Image (cartoon, rainbow, N blue to C red):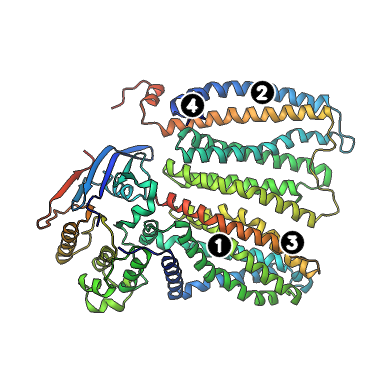
């Protein structure tokens, strides 16, 4: 009788999700394009005056990041739900929160991390300036995993429902607000020369709390959705 | 479970809860009416106008208790939803679902009165001050709860899903509050944007507390009534409901 | 396989949308036994299987594995369980072999069995090996889904309409798998409309929705 190994299962799931994303890499690009397009709308809707753009850049980039995260979150459990793979996950002897963590990690690597790669481009579009770029990357690095973690709870709650993406946004966007506030403020403050360690520390502790608690809530929500 | 008193345990049966809630709703309703009249009298007529804001500050007698209620109801909603989920007590879940629209109403009331208060003070109806912004986000949380509730067809599943959402919300509310407060101090404009009650005086405290209690009783009265309706619907196949509704012999 | 193993449903009742689908359902199954659950559409067969697996929470009653409520140690119960439901539970973007390896790595693997051997047993034509499952027919996909039963070391099989979409040779394959499983001391609960012919293996029947 062999033992089912958690480590093997975790990395198998992670690898599987990354592989599936890669086989659909065209679809992977969509939220990223959305990210860029949304950011581009602001200069078009407002005045492309460099000073103005410089002021609104941190907030706009972060709001766009939130929206892009919302778009990509929907895919986290949907395909697994539809083909029955999700219930198979619930039937393994492994703790569901840890398997969920593997999926969240895969999701972040595919949808969150690329936002960081796009950040310099967007900084250029909005005249962010060089002092703002590193703080922006730091906040994205800390903040996007939080979005994936908290977002996964909402996705798990709505995965079988008709309301779909819009309902998810209603549920999750209010919960994203603390991340938005601290991340955007951190970038703005950094540009003004103010020390932002406090804000980064807050984001870090949010990340730690989300990392510890969100998978539990998501696992519970999945069991409910698959009842 | 021996820590739960017997009367509370009996209340968990939908039939008993229905009856209790009926009487309780009526009593609470009358008490609320009396308290509101008393509170409004003391607040609008008998108490002194604020030395700084004059009579317009009187709106705080509605605004402040409404804001307190919006928070209080969310916590009660989350707790009763959790109890309903963990111990599978329909009456508790019904209580939670009934609390959501009432809580949303108090939040909206707080927002509205905040806006009415703001107009004479700052010249505009809406300012992004910490209190109003927090209340707005809280309204979104309530509406999200109600949206999720209506999106799930099976009532038992809905009860559990909304319980998770409410618990996640309860954990996040302090974080959101803190974030909004911090954000507000960052962007303190030229106008003073504190909607807190001005220096509190005993003659102001009494109407405030009267209104607070009035709202609590109103909340109970309203929620008991709504919860009864939901329980009636959820238990529609049971004998006690059929007897109640018309004495038709079911097949 | 544990010869003393048994699965029991005790006082099961389930309501959906506040209406009862079934009440006071009881049965038990021991090692080497197969249970066929029958009933008209809507009698709750699928729901009952999901309750058996621990996916759905019953309104009343409990499921016991080896005498103990499965809720007490769901992980241990799941280590002994293999479920093939309505949905195939395989990824359409992966090849059959990748799907089988996936199933094996996520759960308790049957020792000494390789993905290739299982694929051969499933009698899939050769071209299927390198092709993502979305390019296979429904019957071929179901064979891959059933492959999980051979990859995993599970004593209890729970199968929801396993014969769906299968041609006669596919149906014979499932019957063979079931007989072998029972003879080796395993047990299975399945729903099906088809008459099941397992050589030498008695099949208990349970009727839902009477």
Q: Residue at x 19, y 50 (%)?
A: C36
Image location of residue A69, percent across then percent down: 57, 64
Task: Residue under label 2, please give it.
Answer: B33
Task: Residue under label 3, please give it.
Answer: A198
Q: Are marks 3 and 2 on the same chain?
A: no
Q: CA distance from mark 1 to mark 2?
A: 47 Å
Q: CA distance from mark 3 to mark 2?
A: 49 Å
Task: Residue under label 4, please give it.
Answer: B11
Extreme-left residue of the structure = C200
Q: Secondary structure at mark 4?
A: helix
Residue C207: quadrant of the picture: top left
Q: Residue at x 28, y 27 (%)?
A: B251
Residue C136: quadrant of the picture: bottom left
| Crowd band around label 4 with a 10 angstrom C-alpha radius: few (<14), some (14–19), many (20+) | some
Of circles 1 and 3, the one toward us is 3
* Chain label for disc 4: B
Q: Residue at x 84, y 38 (%)?
A: B198
| Crowd band around label 2 with a 10 angstrom C-alpha radius: few (<14), some (14–19), many (20+) | some
Q: Quadrant of the N terminus of chain A?
A: bottom left
Of circles 4 and 2, the one toward us is 4
* Chain label for disc 1: A
| Crowd band around label 1 with a 10 angstrom C-alpha radius: few (<14), some (14–19), many (20+) | many
Q: Secondary structure at mark 3?
A: helix
Q: CA distance from mark 1 to mark 3?
A: 23 Å
Q: CA distance from mark 1 to mark 4?
A: 41 Å
Q: Earlier in the sequence, mark 1 or mark 3?
A: 1
Residue A148's label in the rendered image is: 1
Q: Is residue C17 left or right of residue B176?
A: left
Q: CA distance from mark 3 to mark 4?
A: 49 Å
Q: Is residue A193 left or right of residue B248?
A: right
């Amino acid at each position: 009788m062999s033992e089912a190994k958690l480590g093997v299962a975790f990395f198998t799931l992670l690898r599987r999700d990354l592989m599936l994303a890669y086989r659909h890499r065209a679809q992977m690009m969509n939220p990223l394009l959305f990210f860029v397009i949304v950011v581009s709308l602001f200069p078009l809707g407002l005045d492309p005056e460099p000073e103005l753009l410089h002021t609104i850049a941190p907030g706009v980039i972060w709001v766009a990041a939130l929206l892009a995260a919302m778009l990509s979150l929907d895919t986290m459990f949907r395909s697994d739900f539809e083909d029955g793979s999700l219930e198979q996950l619930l039937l393994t002897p492994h703790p569901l929160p840890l398997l969920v963590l593997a999926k969240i990690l895969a999701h972040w690597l595919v949808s969150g991390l690329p936002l960081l790669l796009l950040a310099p481009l967007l900084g250029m579009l909005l005249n962010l300036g060089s002092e703002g770029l590193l703080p922006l990357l730091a906040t994205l690095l800390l903040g996007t995993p939080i979005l994936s973690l908290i977002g996964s709870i909402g996705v798990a709650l709505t995965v079988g429902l008709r309301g779909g993406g819009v309902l998810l946004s209603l549920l999750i966007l209010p919960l994203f607000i603390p991340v938005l506030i601290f991340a955007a403020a951190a970038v703005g403050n950094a540009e003004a020369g103010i020390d932002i360690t406090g804000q980064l520390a807050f984001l870090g502790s949010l990340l730690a709390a989300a990392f510890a608690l969100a998978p539990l809530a998501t696992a519970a929500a999945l069991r409910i959705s698959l009842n | 479970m021996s820590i739960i008193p017997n009367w509370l345990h009996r209340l968990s049966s939908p039939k008993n809860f229905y009856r209790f809630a009926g009487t309780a709703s009526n009593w609470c309703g009358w008490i609320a009416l009396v308290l509101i009249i008393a509170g409004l009298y003391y607040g609008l007529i008998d108490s002194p106008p604020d030395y700084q804001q004059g009579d317009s500050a009187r709106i705080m007698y509605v605004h402040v208790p409404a804001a307190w209620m919006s928070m209080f109801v969310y916590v009660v909603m989350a707790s009763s939803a959790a109890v309903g989920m963990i111990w599978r007590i329909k009456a508790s879940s019904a209580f939670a679902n009934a609390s959501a629209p009432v809580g949303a109403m108090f939040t909206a009331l707080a927002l509205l009165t905040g806006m009415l208060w703001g107009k004479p003070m700052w010249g505009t109806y809406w300012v992004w001050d910490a209190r109003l912004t927090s209340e707005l986000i809280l309204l979104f949380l309530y509406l999200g709860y109600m949206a999720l509730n209506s999106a799930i067809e099976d009532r038992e599943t809905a009860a559990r899903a909304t319980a998770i959402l409410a618990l996640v919300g309860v954990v996040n509310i302090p974080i959101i509050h803190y974030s909004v407060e911090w954000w507000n101090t960052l962007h303190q404009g030229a106008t003073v944007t504190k909607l807190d009650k001005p220096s509190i005086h005993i003659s102001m405290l009494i109407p405030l507390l009267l209104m607070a209690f009035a709202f609590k009783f109103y909340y109970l009265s309203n929620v008991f009534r709504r919860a009864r309706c939901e329980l009636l619907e959820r238990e529609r196949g049971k004998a006690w409901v059929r007897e109640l509704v018309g004495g038709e012999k079911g097949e | 396989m544990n010869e003393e193993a048994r699965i029991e449903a005790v006082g099961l009742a389930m309501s959906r949308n506040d209406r009862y689908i079934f009440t006071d359902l009881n049965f038990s199954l021991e090692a080497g036994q197969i249970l066929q659950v029958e009933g008209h559409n809507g009698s709750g067969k699928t729901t009952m299987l999901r309750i058996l697996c621990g996916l759905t929470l019953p309104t009343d009653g409990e499921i016991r594995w080896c005498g103990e409520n499965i809720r007490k140690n769901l992980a241990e119960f799941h280590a002994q369980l293999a479920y093939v439901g309505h949905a195939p539970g395989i990824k359409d973007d992966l090849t059959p072999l990748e799907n089988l390896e996936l199933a094996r790595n996520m759960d308790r693997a049957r020792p000494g069995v390789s993905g290739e051997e299982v694929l051969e047993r499933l009698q899939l034509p050769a071209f299927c090996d390198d092709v993502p499952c979305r390019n296979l027919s429904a019957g071929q996909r179901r064979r891959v889904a059933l492959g999980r039963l051979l990859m995993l070391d599970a004593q209890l099989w729970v199968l929801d309409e396993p014969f769906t979409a299968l041609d006669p040779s596919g149906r014979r394959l499932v019957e063979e798998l079931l007989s072998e499983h029972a003879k080796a001391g395993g047990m299975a609960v399945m729903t099906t409309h088809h008459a099941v012919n397992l050589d030498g293996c008695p099949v208990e029947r349970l009727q839902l929705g009477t």
